[in-house]
Image: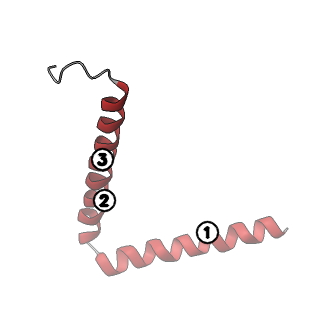
Amino acid sequence: MKDSIQLIVVALLFAAVAWGFWYYLGQNGFGVITLIALVALFADNVRLRRKLRSARPSIDNTP
């Protein structure tokens, strides 16, 4: 019973956040989501390049 109440409370919280996001941003919400996705992709790309550079033996920087 306690878990189901917590689940409903969290669902209502997320619904309120989603409503507020679209209510206050409107059509600009799509631009914000796109910007967040691009920043996340850039950060992941940088992280993976660093990981690849550290895993690769450093003989030369030629491809």
Who's the residue at 35% across and 31% down the image? Answer: 54
What is the CA distance from the residue labelled 2 to the residue labelled 3? 9 Å
Who's the residue at 26% across and 52% down the image? Answer: 38
Helix, strand or loop at mark 2: helix
Q: Where, quadrant-wise, is the N terminus in this rendering?
A: bottom right
Query: Given the image, on which type of amino acid does mark 3 rest?
Result: Leu
Q: Earlier in the sequence, mark 1 or mark 2?
A: 1
Q: Determine the image quadrant of residue 24.
A: bottom left
Q: Which residue is mark 2?
A: 36
Q: Where, quadrant-wise, is the C terminus in this rendering?
A: top left
Q: Which residue is mark 1?
A: 11
Local crowd size for mark 3, using a 10 Å CA cut-off: few (<14), some (14–19), many (≥20): few
Q: Determine the image quadrant of residue 48.
A: top left
What is the CA distance from the residue labelled 1 to the residue labelled 2? 23 Å
Which numbered disc, 1 or 2, marks the residue closer to the eye? Answer: 2
Who's the residue at 33% across and 30% down the image? Answer: 52
Where in the figure is residue 21, as x and y percent of width and height? 38, 74
User: Front-most of 26 and 32?
Assistant: 32
As displayed, is residue 4 above or below residue 41?
below
User: Front-most of 2 and 62?
Assistant: 62
As displayed, is residue 38 above or below residue 10?
above
Residue 41: which numbered mark, if any? 3
Query: Given the image, on which type of amino acid does mark 1 rest?
Result: Ala
Q: Earlier in the sequence, mark 3 or mark 1?
A: 1
